[in-house]
Image (tube, rainbow, N blue to C red):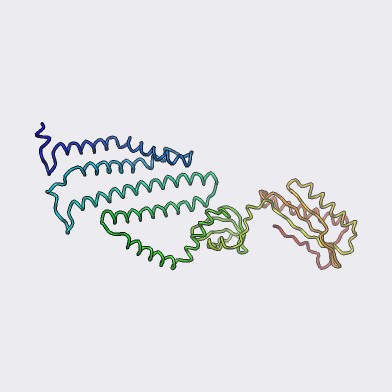
């Protein structure tokens, strides 16, 4: 039996083959448990930064590439203990077969490691998406896809460079220099697109507006329907669909109407110059009573704003909740206007000549 175990086969004993095979077999049999153990270690490290991390999703994404990586590591280490057979010591295109095997092994290990890192990025994206769903920030989900694909592309590029370095023994320093020059040329050629991309990142982090909110920009008022990487799409009040570059959305003065705390109505009454002081006071009192009787009006102001040879000007300001529907808001304005007209008719107050129209600004 001893003679059989010490029998030489391809420059290695049978005993050596049995030991290496046993180690690889143990790694294959117990790969599930070993990978779960190491996945648990990684998970506990991540849980320190975020307590509500979902363990099941993490294991579903990480265990498979981690088990393959660990089995390959153990297998390559075990096989490295064997002597390379002289029978296979030949060259292919001036490259030894042993070097080719080593290069392929290095490439496989790097590829599996990059696969594992890609799965980690997928898990981080799942966690961030869950948080954005809770905060109801739709634009975060839109940009999350971009960031996930962007970092994946960077990882794949790093993997390719590592394979060139360790498998093909190419010095990547010159290649990185070439890539930086190409990148600078592309950046100059796509300057405007890069500015819009950077603006989209500012929108993502600063959050001046979100999808579904109503904004006013460049004299257009509408609802944000989509925030892209280059531009923002807005459905205007006229139901048209406009596209605004993200750089202009960031650089311009933008009024986020959805973020207002109150909706304001501003009315100016130009009364006839012959209206008496008592009539003006009575009109102001009547308007104040009418406004106070409306529960949806949160606060209001009625006062004599100015007087002159042409008219006495009364300013009326009242504020309602921004959550009030536009239909209800219009109905309230109409009701208040009728009450003002009734009060003026009851007191027999006339508007100033040549300024008979009521000036109203709805903010």
Asked if residue 343 lies left or right of residue 168, the reply is: right
Instruction: Please indicate, yes or no, whether residue 237 appears anywhere in the rendered image.
Output: no
Instruction: Answer with the quarter of the image where residue 347 lies.
Output: bottom right
**Extreme top residue here?**
1
209 or 77, which is in the foreground? 77
Which residue: 16% across, 47% down?
A: 84
Residue at point 86% right, 67% down? 309
Q: Residue at x 69, y 57 (%)?
A: 363
Query: In this orientation, which residue lies closer to the viewer: 18 or 233?
Result: 18
Q: Is residue 236 above or below residue 33?
A: below
Q: How many marks?
A: 0
Residue at the image position 81 percent from the left and 68 percent from the top: 354
Looking at the rendered image, the quarter that the N terminus falls into is: top left
Q: Is residue 347 visible?
A: yes
Percent position of residue 250, x then y: 56, 60
Q: Position of residue 193 (x, y in %)?
A: 47, 64
Decide: is 22 above or below 338: above
In the rendered view, does 167 fall on the left or right side of 311? Answer: left
């Amino acid at each position: 039996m001893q003679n059989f175990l010490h029998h030489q086969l391809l420059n290695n004993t049978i005993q050596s083959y049995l030991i290496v095979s046993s180690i690889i077999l143990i790694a294959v049999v117990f790969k599930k448990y070993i990978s779960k153990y190491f996945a648990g270690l990684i998970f506990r490290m991540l849980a320190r930064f975020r307590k509500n991390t979902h363990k099941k999703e993490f294991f579903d994404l990480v265990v498979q590439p981690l088990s393959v990586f660990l089995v390959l590591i153990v297998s390559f280490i075990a096989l490295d203990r064997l002597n390379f057979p002289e029978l296979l010591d030949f060259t292919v295109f001036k490259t030894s077969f042993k070097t080719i095997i080593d290069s392929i092994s290095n490439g496989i290990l790097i590829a599996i490691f990059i696969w594992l890192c890609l799965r980690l990025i997928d898990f981080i994206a799942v966690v961030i998406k869950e948080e954005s769903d809770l905060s109801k920030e739709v634009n975060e989900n839109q940009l999350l896809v971009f960031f996930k694909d962007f970092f994946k592309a960077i990882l794949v590029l790093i993997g390719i460079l590592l394979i060139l370095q360790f498998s093909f023994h190419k010095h990547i320093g010159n290649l990185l220099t070439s890539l930086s020059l190409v990148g600078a040329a592309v950046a100059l050629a796509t300057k405007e697109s890069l500015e819009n991309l950077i603006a989209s990142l500012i929108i993502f982090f600063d959050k001046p507006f979100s999808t579904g909110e109503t904004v006013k920009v460049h004299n257009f008022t509408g609802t944000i329907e989509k925030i892209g990487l280059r531009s923002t799409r807005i459905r205007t009040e006229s139901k048209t669909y406009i596209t605004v570059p993200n750089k202009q959305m960031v650089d311009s003065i933008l009024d986020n109407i959805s973020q207002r705390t109150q909706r304001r109505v501003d009315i100016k009454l130009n009364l006839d110059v012959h209206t008496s002081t008592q009539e003006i006071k009575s009109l102001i009192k009547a308007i104040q009573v009418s406004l106070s009787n409306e529960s949806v009006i949160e606060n209001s102001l009625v006062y004599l704003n100015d007087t002159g040879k042409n008219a006495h000007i009364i300013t009326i300001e009242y504020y309602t909740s921004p959550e009030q529907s536009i239909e209800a808001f219009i109905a309230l304005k109409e009701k208040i206007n009728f009450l003002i007209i009734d009060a003026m008719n009851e007191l027999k107050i006339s508007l100033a000549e040549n300024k008979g129209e009521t000036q109203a600004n709805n903010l």
